[in-house]
Amino acid sequence: MEKHISRSIIKGFADKLSAAVESDVAIVGAGPSGLICAKILAEAGKRVSLFEMKLAPGGGVWGGAMLNNDIIIQEEVTSMLDEYGIRYTDVGEGLVKTDSVETASALIYGAVHAGATIFNGVVVEDVVYKENAVGGVVINWTPVLYPNKWHVDPLIITAKCVLDGTGHDALLTDKVARKAGIKLNTPTGGVMGEKPMWAEEGEIATVENTKEVYPGLFVSGMAANGVFGSARMGPIFGGMFLSGQRAAELILAKLDG
Ligand code: 48F
C-alpha cells in the first residue's frame, strides 16, 4: 500500500510537469486575474500551466479587506459570479459582496476543472527570452529560493505566451525589462510603478492596461496597473475578473490569429 501511494504520486506529478514543459500559455501568479484567464484559455482547449509561489492559490482574494473576509464586486460582473456559482448579496450603489473564501475556492476549482494545471509552491524566477520575444518561464521550488536562496538550478517551461499576473509590484515584468534591456509597450518603455488608492480609476485602468507589453509577454490585474502606472483599488474585484477575461481574449487572438 505505502509503495503504491508513493509511486502513484511521483508518476502523476512527473506526467503533469512533463506535459507542462511545452505549454501554450504559462500564467505566473494564481490571483483572481490569472485564475480567470486560465479557465477561459483551458476551456478554449489551450495547454495552460499556472505557477503559484505560495502553497494556496487565490492571491489577494482570501483576505478580503484587512482580514474581513468579504470582497466587493460591481453588479455588471455578477454574470461571471453566476458562471462559477459564487453567491452574492446586494450592498447598494451598484455593488455586491461575496464571501472571499467561497470566491477564492471557486476560482481555483474553475481553473483546474476547465483543464488548466496549477503548480503551487513553484516560483517563476525568470523568463525564456530569445529572438526578441518571451518564450517561456524559468521555475524553481519556492522553498529553494525563499528564504533559503539555495544555489539550485531551475527547470524551464516553454510557452507561446506568458502572462504576468503577479500582483502589485509586477516583479516579473520588471525583471524581464531590466535583464533583457528591452523597451516595454508603455509610455516610458519601462515599468512605471503603481499609484496610490483610487478605486474607480484603478478598476477601469486594470482592464485597459491588460496588454501584450512585449512580444509573448502579457500583463493582467494589479501587475498591469503596476506596469502602466495606474492606481490601486483595494478590496473591489470586478476589474480583476474583467482583466483576466481580457487577457484570455488577447492571448487567444495571438494563438489563433
Ligand atoms: O495579487 P494577486 O491577487 O493578483 P491579481 O490578479 O489580483 C489583485 C487583487 O488580489 C488585489 C487587488 C484588488 O482588486 O488589488 O490585490 O493582480 O495575486 C498574485 C499572485 O501571484 C503570486 C502571488 O503569490 C499571488 O498569489 N506570485 C507573485 N510572484 C510570483 C507569484 C512568482 N514570481 N512566481 C509565482 N507566483
Image (cartoon, rainbow, N blue to C red):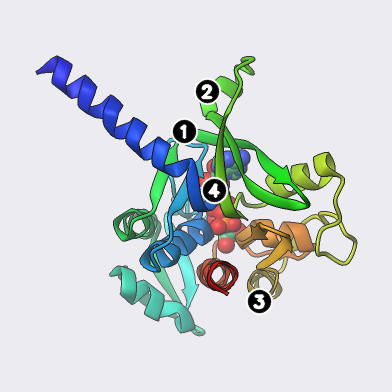
Task: Specify whether tag 4 is near ligand 1 (CB below 8 Å).
Answer: yes
User: Tag on residue 99?
Assistant: none
Q: Nearer the viewer, mark 3 or mark 1?
A: 1
Could you give the CA–CA distance between mark 2 and mark 1, rounded to whole angstroms? 8 Å
The residue that appears at 76% across and 49% down in the rendered structure is: 131
Could you give the CA–CA distance between mark 4 and mark 3, rounded to whole angstroms? 21 Å
**Closer to the N terminus: mark 2 or mark 1?**
1
Few, some or many C-alpha atoms within 10 Å of disc 4 (few <14, some 14-19, many ≥20)?
many
Amino acid found under the numbered disc labelled 3: Ile
Q: Which residue is mark 3?
A: 204
The residue that appears at 39% across and 48% down in the rendered structure is: 117
Residue 85 is left or right of residue 107, and the answer is left
Q: Nearer the viewer, mark 4 or mark 3?
A: 4
Could you give the CA–CA distance between mark 2 and mark 4, rounded to whole angstroms? 16 Å
User: Tag on residue 143?
Assistant: 2
Whether residue 150 is situated above or below residue 52 in the rendered picture: above
User: Tag on residue 29?
Assistant: 4
**Closer to the N terminus: mark 4 or mark 3?**
4
Amino acid found under the numbered disc labelled 1: Gly
Residue 104 is left or right of residue 188, and the answer is left
Could you give the CA–CA distance between mark 2 and mark 3, rounded to whole angstroms? 36 Å
Q: Which residue is mark 1?
A: 121
Q: Callout 2: helix, strand or loop?
A: helix
Q: Are marks 2 and 1 in contact (CB under 8 Å)?
A: yes
**Closer to the N terminus: mark 3 or mark 1?**
1
**Closer to the N terminus: mark 2 or mark 4?**
4
**Closer to the N terminus: mark 1 or mark 4?**
4
Camera-nearest residue between 22 and 241:
22
Few, some or many C-alpha atoms within 10 Å of disc 3 (few <14, some 14-19, many ≥20)?
some
Amino acid found under the numbered disc labelled 4: Gly
